[in-house]
Amino acid sequence: MRLAILLSFVAVALGRDDLVDDTSLSAGQYSRNPGLKPVSSRDTHNMVASELVSRDAFSGPSKASSYALRFGGRRQEKRQSQTTPADIRPTPEPTGASSATTTVHIIDEHDFALLLPYRPGELISDAESDGVSYCTLDSTDPACSKRVTDGFIRAAAVSTSDDGSYIQVTGCLDVSKSSLDPSDSGGQFDVRFPNGAQCTFGGYGASFIQLVEPAANRFCLRCCRSRDDQINCNSHQDRAGCQTAIPGTYDFPSLGVTCEE
C-alpha cells in the first residue's frame, strides 16, 4: 500500500496519469486503513523531493552543470559558475611588407596615430583591407602623411603596463568631425589587416590591436612589446568591443567628456 501511495505522489509530481492506479490515494485524502495517517501536500513534496535527490545522486550533474543539494527534504538548485577561457590561439602572421602608411604609434595623449578608413563613409570592418594611419594634429612624427580633423579626438588617455609589455591609448571620438558612418558598430585592425600594419612600440610583427567604434564614439589601441602576445594583445576579441578588449579610460569627468554622449 505504501509503495502504491509513493508511486501515486511521484506520478502526480511528474504529470504521469498512466502511473496512477484508480485505488491510489491523492494528497490530503484519508486512507481506508485506519492505521494510516492522512497524507499532507507537504509530505508529498518532501517524499518526491527525496526521490528526485536520490535519482540525481546516481545520474550525475545535468547538462546545465547544476547539482542538487538536499536541505530539509527539499531539492534546491545551485548553478555552477561558468567562465569562458580566453582564446589565446597564436597571433596570425603579419601580412605584406611593413609600410609607413599603415604604421601607428603612441607617444602621449596628444601624439599618437590610428588606422582609419581611407574612403569616406567606409565601414571599419571593410577598411581592414585598405585602412591607413592618421596622426593627431599635435603629432611630431615626421612619417605622418595624414592627420585627423580638429575635434575628432575629444579626449584620450595613455597608460602602460607595470612590466613594460604594452602601451595603450583609449578615448572618445566626435564622429561628426569625420567621414565615418555614425551608425557603424566598428571593427578591428591588427598585424594582419591592413597589409604591413605595425606599431612602432614593438616594431613589425609585434602584436597590437586597435578597435574603432563610431556608433559608441570610442577608440582604443594597445601595442605590445613582443610577437604573439595573446595575453595582452588578444587579436581574437575583435567583436568584444573596446571596454572588454582593451580596458581603459572612456570617461573624462575633469574634461566634461564621456563616450556615451
Image: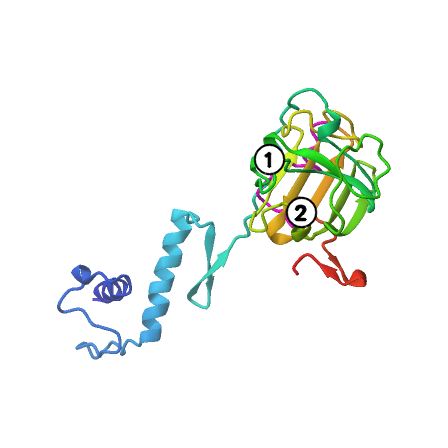
Q: Which of the 4 quarters of the picture holds residue 93?
A: top right
- Identify the residue at image location x=65%, y=51%: 175
- Identify the residue at image location x=79%, y=50%: 157
Q: Nearer the viewer, residue 240 or 70?
A: 240
Label of residue 178 in the image: 2
Quarter of the image for the C terminus: give it. Answer: bottom right
Above-or-below relation of 260 to 214: below
Label of residue 227 in the image: none
Q: Amino acid at mark 1?
A: Ala
Residue found at the far top of this picture: 97
- Give the residues drawn in magenta, as a range: 227-244
Q: Does the magenta-highlighted stretch encompass residue 248?
A: no
Above-or-below relation of 3 to 117: below
Residue found at the far right of this picture: 140
Mark 2 element type: loop
Q: Amino acid at mark 2?
A: Ser
Mark 1 element type: helix
Q: Does the magenta-highlighted stretch encompass residue 232?
A: yes
Q: Nearer the viewer, residue 24 or 102?
A: 102
- Identify the residue at image location x=76%, y=63%: 256
Q: Is residue 210 left or right of residue 1?
A: right
Q: Report how far apart the C-alphas of labels 1 and 2 lie in the structure.
A: 15 Å
Q: Main secondary structure of the magenta part?
A: loop
Question: Is residue 248 visible from the viewing direction of this image?
Answer: no
Tell me where residue 162 appears, x and y as whole percent: 83, 42
Tell me where residue 247 appears, x and y as whole percent: 70, 48
**Residue on which the image places disc 1:** 127
Q: Is residue 124 left or right of residue 41?
A: right
Which badge, 1 or 2, comes first in the chain's sequence?
1
